[in-house]
Amino acid sequence: MAELALRSLTKAYGQTEVLHGIDLEVADGEFVVLVGPSGCGKSTTLRLIAGLEDTTSGAIEIGGRDVARLEPAARDIAMVFQNYAIYPHMTVRKNIGFGLRASKLPRADKKERIAEVAEILGMTPLLDRKPSQLSGGQRQRVAIGRAMVRDPAVFLFDEPLSNLDAQLRTQMRLEIKKLHQRVGTTIVFVTHDQVEAMTLADRIVIMKDGHIRQVGTPSEVYRNPADTFVARFIGAPSMNLIEGRADGARVALASGGEIALARGGGDVLLGVRPDDLHPVEGPALIEGRVTVQEPLGPETLIYVETSAGEVIAKADGRVPPAVGSTVRLGAAPEDIHLFDRQSGLALA
């Protein structure tokens, strides 16, 4: 295990810079997830850490040593890709042990390490099978095992669950989390799926257009988004954003409503998550007509057309407001966020 640090890391292809001075510190044994939309730079960052691409400038430190100019084999990392990249003609045992072929370990030690990794991953009964005899989830475990057997300082995962169906993704998320809790290796994990990020990470790094927009625990980025991009990217359904104007004590909404909030001033966006917006009988934040229901069992999502645009709220699944009915929606003051309308930045 080792700590990882990226310092003023940049990457350019010709005259086009795609990473703009990335600074990030990952603690020894920490599970950090890089997440963002396609083209945000998350996979490029991972490839630079792995040494699969050259950095344009900046440092990559693993265990306090700058490895930015070293070959991948000299960086003490192991990488698991989106595709399984396992050899179909080899058994599970040989696939897991492939990463040790160049190792100077005695043969007995190699066998012991393969057996230990197989036990951790629950693959011991499958060691003599070929990949064609395995499920998708089992094949991905083989790929993880081949990385584990090298006992690297840092694990790198490049969207390893993308090719699995929904049920297998859920199962593998749980297995990867249990694996990290058991072995405690430093992990950098790339995904475009914010659910994976929220469920796996100790900390999440949210990226857009080659910049880091926010770093924090899953709770921090969900409850205290740094800007409107993070607010809408993290959480499903996305946060509702309603135009308004603040005078330092109150916010007048474009929908005609008003709320007492002693934060900021000028043109703002008021943000409230669907989980925090509910039908109310008394004073309301906003009101409108229900256009769509999405039953979720104990709760129902309702889509409400208002004078400020469509918002999404959550209602009691037993007696949700009917489609076509008018509803008044409210939220607790502590669940309301304010953002500067021009910059998109959160207002304290």
Image (spheres, rainbow, N blue to C red):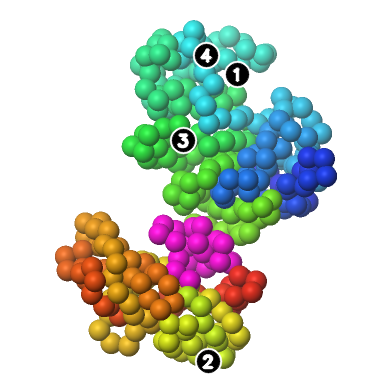
- Measured along the vertical axis of the image, is residue 1 above or below residue 273? above
Q: Can you tell which mark lies on residue 249?
A: 2
Label 3 neighbour load within 10 Å: few <14, some 14-19, many 20+: many
Q: Mark 3 points at which residue?
A: 161
Residue 220 visible within the image: no
Tell me which numbered mark, 4 or 3, is placed earlier along the sequence: 4
Neighbours of disc 1 within 10 Å: few (<14), some (14-19), many (20+): some
- Quadrant where the N terminus sits is top right
**Whole-percent x, y for residue 142 in the image:** 47, 22
Residue with the mark numbered 4: 87
Assign a secondary structure to mark 2: loop
Can residue 124 be seen here? The reply is yes
Span of residues in magenta: 221-241
N-terminal of the pair, mark 4 or mark 1, is: 4
For image coordinates 47% across by 82% down, the residue present is: 254
Which residue matches tag 1? 99
Q: Which amino acid does label 4 sit on?
A: Tyr
The residues tagged by marks 2 and 3 sit, at their Cα atoms, a distance apart of: 47 Å
Give residue 317's mark: none
Mark 3: which amino acid? Leu
Quadrant in which residue 11 is drawn? top right
